[in-house]
Image (cartoon, helix red, strand yellow):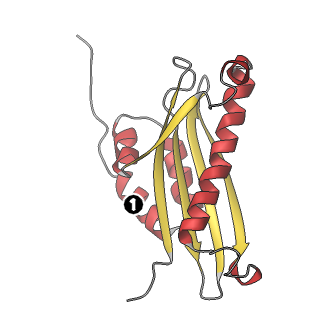
């Protein structure tokens, strides 16, 4: 059995500042090549008056890192992509709420937990982040994520009306 060559994870963030950024979603990916090169991506979708997205990539050449020092694999790249996304989200929160760093010196002003990838489908069906999810599908190098979002885009939007 061969090792997987790509993977993606989805996380949900809850701010301790009420309604600060809605409930941001972070998607991280990792892929590897036969030459021990790895690519990671991160996508953070959040509200800041409007629906926004922050993205980034990282590249790691596993051949440059001795295995006795550090194991470079998909898990490592997913973890690093998550850390980059987390740092970026922390910047967003702290720029909007400077008191966040003063009030929470030893813990971030938000909690981030893993969530099922179906969360992305629920966002779509709630008519949230359509352009951002379409951009992720178009720009990701992770075939598994691209395929999943391709299916998500065909889902209906839930029709709701308040009475």
Q: Which residue is painted at 58% across and 74% down in the image?
A: 73
Does residue 69 lie above or below 147 as drawn? below
Q: Quadrant of residue 100?
A: top right
Left or right of 142 in this view: 62: right
| Residue 98 percent coordinates (x, y) | 74, 20
Q: Which residue is painted at 71% across and 69% down in the image?
A: 59
Does residue 113 lie above or below 49 as drawn? below
Q: Which residue is painted at 50% across and 26% down in the image?
A: 22
Q: Which residue is tagged 1?
A: 148
| Residue 75 percent coordinates (x, y) | 54, 67
| Residue 57 percent coordinates (x, y) | 68, 59
Most foreground residue, 4 or 126: 4
Does residue 139 lie above or below 32 as drawn? above
Most foreground residue, 19 or 160: 19
Mark 1 closeness class: few <14, some 14–19, many ≥20 residues within 10 Å: some
Q: Which residue is painted at 39% across and 60% down in the image?
A: 148
Q: Using the rendered image of the protein, determine whether residue 141 is visible from the camera's viewpoint.
A: no
Name the image quarter holding the N terminus.
Answer: bottom left
| Residue 65 percent coordinates (x, y) | 74, 78
Q: Using the rendered image of the protein, determine whether residue 81 is visible from the camera's viewpoint.
A: yes
Name the image quarter holding the C terminus.
Answer: top left
Left or right of 161 in this view: 31: right
Outermost residue to the top: 163
Secondary element at tag 1: helix
Q: How many marks?
A: 1
Does residue 39 lie above or below 65 as drawn? above
């Amino acid at each position: 059995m061969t090792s997987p060559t790509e993977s993606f994870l989805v996380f949900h963030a809850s701010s301790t500042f009420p309604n600060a950024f809605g409930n941001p979603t972070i998607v991280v990916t990792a892929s590897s090549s036969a030459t021990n090169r790895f690519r990671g991506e991160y996508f953070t979708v959040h509200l800041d008056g409007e629906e926004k997205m922050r993205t980034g990539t990282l590249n790691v050449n596993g051949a440059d890192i001795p295995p006795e020092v550090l194991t470079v694999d998909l898990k490592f790249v997913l973890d690093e992509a998550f850390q980059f996304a987390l740092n970026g989200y922390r910047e967003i929160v702290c720029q909007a709420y400077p008191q966040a760093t003063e009030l929470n010196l030893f813990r971030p002003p938000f909690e981030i937990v893993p969530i099922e990838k179906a969360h992305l489908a629920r966002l779509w069906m709630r008519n949230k982040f359509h352009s951002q999810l379409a951009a992720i599908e178009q720009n990701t190098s992770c075939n598994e994520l691209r395929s999943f979002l391709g299916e998500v885009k065909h889902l209906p939007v839930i029709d709701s009306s308040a009475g």
